[in-house]
Image (cartoon, rainbow, N blue to C red):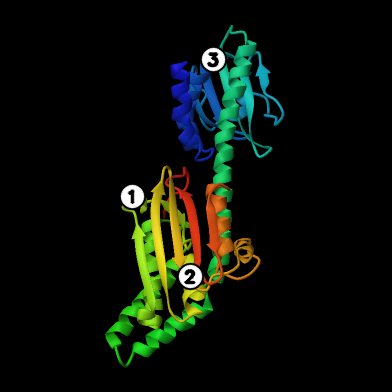
Amino acid sequence: MQAALHAAIVMLPDLRKGLSEESAAKAVMPLRTLTGAEAVALGDRDHVLAFEGLSDDHHRAGDPLLRITAPPREDRLHVESQIDCENPTCQLGAAIAAPLVVAGELVGSFVALYARGHRVTPDDTRTVGEAASLVSAQLELKQMDEQAERLARAELRALRAQISPHFIYNALAAIAGYIHSKPEEARELLTEFAEFTRYAFRGQRPYVTLADELSYVEKYLRLERARFGERLQVRLEVAPEVLQAVVPVLSLQPLVENAVRHGVEQRGFGRIEIIGRHIGADVELRVIDNGVGMEPERAQTVLAGQGGGVGIANVQARLQSTFGPDYGLEIESAPDRGTTVTMTLPKFRAGVRAA
């Protein structure tokens, strides 16, 4: 039992990468241990991707699956009492072929083979079926990871399309205002602006560390302080142990931009706080402003994407598609009492890695 459990654990990370010759080659030995078969094969719909065990001198990767089993079917596993091998030295007899099904579609087969004279038992078929289900589950998780990443990329493209022209105009106007009076300051601000826009539109994976996101939030705030001067006060307090948490790119910056636009700009002055701390296995980030605030009912419509805010609903959608419905944003606000937006995310989530 311990050997079987170890075999199952060992093969999971490789199969999570998808079904290929490389992942199949790493998984067949643990699968052989798991099933107790004399030989096993993993294949796509037509060919063997990897073979391990008895008679591997003439059964190998690249062979047609038909050499060891009938064509696979989505609905059930298939038992061969004697495989049809033309090699007279072949020591293999019975075979059990189980389909690998992902999202209702047949993607391959797992075949367990036994020595001549072995009589297939119900325990054999049950074990092979369960092993195939385990393989299929990992392949389906791979597909879900890819779908989630495609969704995150699509939502990120949508957010990039919303990058505030208001901010871009004001940032460039502030830089222009320094060109004659403070040329060195203008040069530095232009560099900050270029680095921020490069970050916002970079074409890499849609995830970054919180440390990276905060770095570019600071660049954004420096550009805003060039416009507001001492009228914009900023307090940043983030626990060092949460800085390596992974977040969707441009997830914190839109919250800060909203705090500037609706918390500071409408009054002409204000204070923004960014607080980060760890709570058990999670990270909590708060963006707090002392601006004009809003009715609680309006805060919920903003979160739902029904009006106002720069990308708030987009950030919420990306957080929940990445980490699940237990994570995301909450907004607390009241007229003349400012707004607090709280982001909650896990410190670690398998498959979500920074670029």
Identity of the amino acid at label 2? Ala
Q: From the viewer's side, name the closer residue of 289 and 253.
A: 289
**Residue 296 pos. (x, y %):** 60, 63
10 Å neighbourhood of mark 2: few (<14), some, or many (≥20)?
A: many
Is disc 1 in contact with disc 2, using a CB cutoff of under 8 Å? no
Relative to 319, residue 57 above or below: above
Which image quarter: residue 92? top right
In the shown orientation, is residue 334 left or right of residue 210?
A: right
The span from disc 1 to disc 3 (Cα, nearest Å) is: 59 Å
Residue 256 in view here:
yes
Secondary element type, mark 1: helix
Which image quarter: residue 135? top right
Q: From the viewer's side, name the closer residue of 177 and 283.
A: 283
Question: Residue 341 bears which disc, if any?
Answer: none
Q: From the viewer's side, name the closer residue of 82 and 106.
A: 106
Relative to 208, residue 17 above or below: above
Q: Residue at x 38, y 89 (%)?
A: 177
Relative to 63, residue 258 above or below: below
Secondary element type, mark 3: loop
Q: Residue at x 56, y 64 (%)?
A: 312
Task: Read off the residue under disc 1.
Answer: 241
Relative to 275, residue 17 above or below: above
**Dot placed on the residue nearer the N-terminal end, 1 or 2:** 1
Task: Read off the residue under disc 3.
Answer: 90
Task: Read off the residue under disc 2.
Answer: 259
**Residue 288 pos. (x, y %):** 45, 65
10 Å neighbourhood of mark 1: few (<14), some, or many (≥20)?
A: few
Identity of the amino acid at label 3? Cys
